[in-house]
Structures are given as structure tokens and as C-alpha cells.
Image: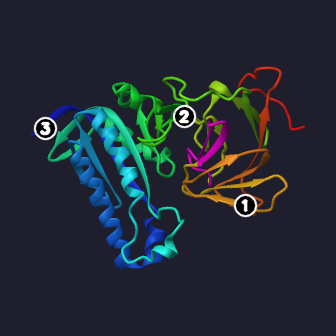
Amino acid sequence: MTQILQRTVLFADLRGSTALYETLGNTEATTVVTRSVALVGRIVTNHRGVVVKTLGDGLMAVFENAADAVLAADEMHESMDRITPIGSNPIATAGRSPVLKLQVGLAQGEVVEMSGDCFGDAVNVAARLLDHAGDNEILATVNVVSPQPDEMRARFRSLDRVQLRGRVEPVHVFLLEGRRFSDTAATAYGELMPAPTEPEGIRLVWLDQNRVYSGPSLPVVLGRSPQVTYCIDDSRVSRSHARIDWHGGAFQLTDLSFNGTYVRFTGGSEIISLRRGTCTLHGSGTLGLGASLSDPTAPHVRFEVMRFSDTQPQSPVEFAFR
């Protein structure tokens, strides 16, 4: 029987399982991954959702109520933080980040339910949001965010309109920040923390592209797709490769790619490797997209964090490094 329903679609994906198999061995890693996916499935059920199918290291689920879907996604992240490999030495693993990272995409809309599976634009959008999610991030469309209670809605920060793979029209995407029992940052629905008193900008330079971004032009998405904010035409660069946000008084760089993003600050020799991770950008330096900065043929994007003490900058604007 085929039904057309309004549903909130959730895709959850565990990343890091390859390294887990290498570190723990097949038996224990399989147990951890299986237990993690089962835990995520139980959380879906506990929040009145339905697991449509499991997808290797993740699953797809649907909810009648968008608020239930967001609460489930929030609890998934909190529960994943408590998962530790069976048989692991607690002393040896103390202080380490969780080995598995969870990305969640949420979209609301009409779905076609047929033979136990679901199809439709909301399904495609929720799945594609995972391409843009960093480690332990929850991304949602505006139709998911709008009906949320005020307290939950205040935790969402707008990432503006994002071009999703295979879709003509961009989608307005929001990032869920903080935890249920912690303070939250400024969001698209109101200031919960004082905004920085001095506006900031970031300059990006690659070949003849010399631009400064600030304020309403953020976040900046760097990638190969012509639809991203800062286009870098190189086969090693993913369509949406990395994202730069202004958050908590600092610029945050998040890798969204398959080949990684690399950071070296001016005056330093260390190269920071990001694999779906995030780091704070300060001062100036160079970003390597898709290949290490030690590779001279890789696309290297220079950046400079700027302070505008006298005037409000327009974005983007063009001017050269001093």
C-alpha cells in the first residue's frame, strides 16, 4: 500500500569505523558499531519515531513530529559520548575523543511510503545534509526548525542557503548548537550571549580570488561546486569542501570533505590535519584543500583574520595582502 505523508526524515551516519577496525580488530569493532547503531535505533523508537532501514554504519528514520525528531537527534549525540569499546583499558583510553563520530541530517516534508520504505524530496535533502555535516553535528532544514519550541529553536544557528548535491534549488540549513543542559550561543532567532563588540572579517586568497567576508556573508563554503561561496576548481577539492563560520567570537573552520583540509599558521611549521573536524582560525596562515600543504601542486588558500576598528566592511570586497 502506498501512502503520501508529512514526515520529518532523519539520517544518522557513524564515521570513524574504519579506524576502529584497525585499532580494535574486527570482532570488537563490529560489536561497537553494531551496538552503536542499535542504540541510535532505540532512541528513535523512544521518541516515537520509526526506523525505516539501517545503512551500514547508520540508519534512516521518520517522525510524525519535528520536535520528537530533534530531541532524538540531540539524545543520540549525548549517548554516543558514553560509548566505549568493550574490553578497552579505561586508563589507555582516558582523555581521548570518542572514536565514532555521529552526523545527523533532518528534513521535513511530504514523503511517499511504499513497501516499508520512504521516498521524496525530504528524504533526499536529509541524506544530502550529511555531506555538509562536520563531526558530531546536527543539520536541519528551516521546516524542521520553525515548529520547534522556543527553547529548542534558540539553539539553532543559520548556515544560510546551502547548495546540496543533485538539487537545483539551495536549501536553508541550520546547525543545532550546544547541549540540552548547557549554555547556548547566539542564534538566528535571537541573541542569547553578548555579541563581540568589534566586527571581524576573514580574507581568503587563491590565485586571483582575493576576498574579504564578514557579517551577513558568513558562513563561507569553500569547494569545487560553482554554487559555493568560494569556488576552487581543482579535482582534489570536494564540491562542498570546508566551511568557515563566525561563532563564539572566533572563526571556526570545519572540514566537510573526503580528502581532508590542512591548516598551517604563519610562523609555525606544524600542519593541522582536519578530517571532518573543526579548528579555530586566528592570525594568518594557509589552508590546503584535498592534499597536504607539503604538496606544492595542491590548492593553497591563504587566510588572514582581520579587525575593522574604524569602518564596517562590505562583503565581499577586493584588496590585496599588505
Residue drawn at x 69%, y 61% as measured from the top left: 292
Residue 134 numbered tag: none
Q: What kind of residue is marked 3?
A: Thr
- Which of pointers 1 and 2 indicates the residue nearer the eye? 2
Could you tell me how far apart the alpha carbons at marks 1 and 2 are, in whole angstroms?
Answer: 29 Å
The dot on residue 271 is 1
- Find the distance from the CA under tag 2 to the CA under tag 3: 43 Å
Nearest to the observer: residue 288 or residue 1: 288
In the displayed structure, would residue 23 be above or below residue 246? below
- Tell which circle, 1 or 2, labels the residue nearer the N-terminal end: 2
Counting from the top left corner in percent of width and height, residue 181 is at 42, 41
Give how far apart the Cα atoms at labels 3 and 1 are. 53 Å
Would residue 173 be found to the left or right of residue 234 on screen?
left
Give the residues in magenta: 236-254
Q: Is residue 117 magenta?
A: no
- Give the answer, above or below, for where 137 lies relative to 245: below
Mark 3 sits on what residue? 2
Mark 3 and mark 1 lie on one chain; the one further toward the N terminus is: 3
- Label 1 environment density (alpha carbons within 10 Å; few <14, some 14–19, many ≥20): some
Mark 2 = which residue? 185
Relative image position of residue 194 (x, y in whole percent): 62, 27
Membership of 244 in magenta stretch:
yes
> Residue 206 at what x, y percent from top left?
76, 43
